[in-house]
Image: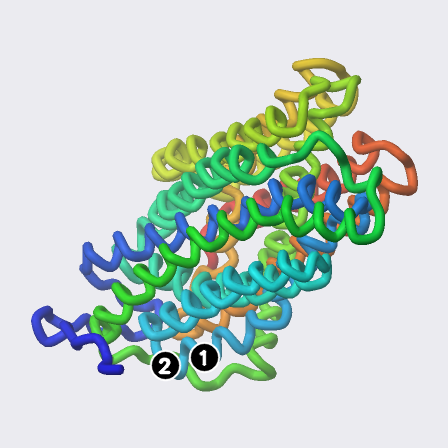
Amino acid sequence: MALAPDISSSTDPVAVEGQGTHVDAPELRLFVMGLFFIFGGITSLNDVLIPKLKELFTLNYTQAMLIQFCFFAAYLVIGIPGAKLVKKIGYMRGAVVGLVTMLVGCLLFIPASQQAVYGLFLLALFVLASGIVIVQVVANPLISLLGKPETVHSRLTFAQAFNSLGTTVFPIIGSILILGSLATVSADQLSGVELDAYRTAESQAIVHGYLGIAAALTVVAGAVWLFRNRLQGEKHEARAGVAGFDLLGRPRFGFGALCIFLYVGAEVSIGSLVVNYLMQPGVMALPEQAAGKLIGLYWGGAMIGRFIGSGVMRVVSPGKLLACVAIGAITLILISTNTTGIVSGYSLLAIGLMNAIMFPTIFSLASEKLGSRAADGSGIINVAIFGGAVVPLATGIIADLTGSLATALLLPALCYAVIAAFGYYARRPAC
């Protein structure tokens, strides 16, 4: 099969030398925004998959949280190799590798459904997440390059708003397609051949959704391949210690990496439990699909907050703003867990607004002054996203041990407390 034509000869190549320079390439900004939209939306679909697979395979909260564990474990396994790959083949080709890997992960949902085996669903999610990791290693430092250094905090927050647009849209559609197919019977009422047939039939909705995503990824990967030589002269520092982990010796970066771990863990924990939380009689007593649609409010709050935050941070210290929203998240958790009805439900959903600026702000504050080691730093940050595997699993264990989702939510509150401390610590520019 012939390769796609190289169209870089029709445009002026952009020279890139680490993070210390900036480039003017509007079409690449659009491309990066698109990447944020795609991997944000796919990640948020896990919040819909959890109640679906929890019912199909009669799982407890700990077992259901293995969905997030296997998905975010990819950040631990692939983060550093992904950074090395991007340094070797460049940002654009690295993005293509990531997109193709995501495509493979989507296609693996077909045998997972046919075999009706929970472990195969977890494998498909791991492969899908592996591609997302590589795409994120590309996207985070690349958006920093595509503009003036003094506006990097605002620009990264604006890009993350498109991530939130994906996380808002995908769960709403996913709730209709995936949760809407739940039958009048449940898996715990069946056994043997009937149970296998039920699982296979009900999981077809999952397959159809991910096949649609696979088709879109094919188109995007092809388009990115056409621009594979748009950036030329990329230079990434070869000296990286042991896989770049020497960067953790820098207090600001090390503290920031810890906060990425805790932030992603807290955000994912809340998103993973929100459907079951809203279904509780003491909260809003919603049916499953109705609760699933409200996930869009959680992620939509993050989208709105990021557009607002990108402007606010032009006049307010990013560190101070980070500390304030972290304290706000703690307050909302305490309100939710100590009230009932719509106050309890909507105060939990409102945490999305507090989450809005956290990831991009922590990332950019931690990565200040990394220069040509931007790819190494992005790789370490992506490893830290492994918090999305650990904290939700721990939250699920607490929920099972105590029999209370409200008690389990105190763990994310502790995570936000550490983030507030980092915001205060990093309130001044790095030296």
CB atoms at circles 1 and 2 under 8 Å apart?
A: yes
- Residue 129: image location, x then y, percent: 55, 61
Q: Residue at x 60, y 36 (%)?
A: 181
Q: Which residue is mark 1?
A: 85
**Circle number at residue 89:** 2
Which kind of residue does numbered mark 2 sit on? Ile
Q: Residue at x 63, y 39 (%)?
A: 271
Q: Nearer the viewer, residue 174 or 11?
A: 174
**Circle number at residue 152:** none
Q: Is residue 430 above or below residue 180?
A: below
For residue 21, which quarter of the picture?
A: bottom left
For residue 312, which quarter of the picture?
A: top left
Element marked by disc 2: helix
At label 2, counting other C-alpha atoms closer than 10 Å, the crowd grade (few under 14, some 14-19, many 20 or more) is some
- Residue 210: image location, x then y, percent: 49, 53
Q: Residue at x 65, y 57 (%)?
A: 258
Q: Marks 1 and 2, Cα distance to the nearest angstrom?
A: 6 Å
Q: Residue at x 41, y 35 (%)?
A: 309
Q: Residue furthest front?
A: 193
- Residue 209: image location, x then y, percent: 49, 48
Q: Nearer the viewer, residue 262 or 189?
A: 189
For residue 66, which quarter of the picture?
A: bottom right
Left or right, 421 with reference to 79: right
At label 1, counting other C-alpha atoms closer than 10 Å, the crowd grade (few under 14, some 14-19, many 20 or more) is some
Which kind of residue does numbered mark 1 sit on? Leu
Color style of the picture = rainbow
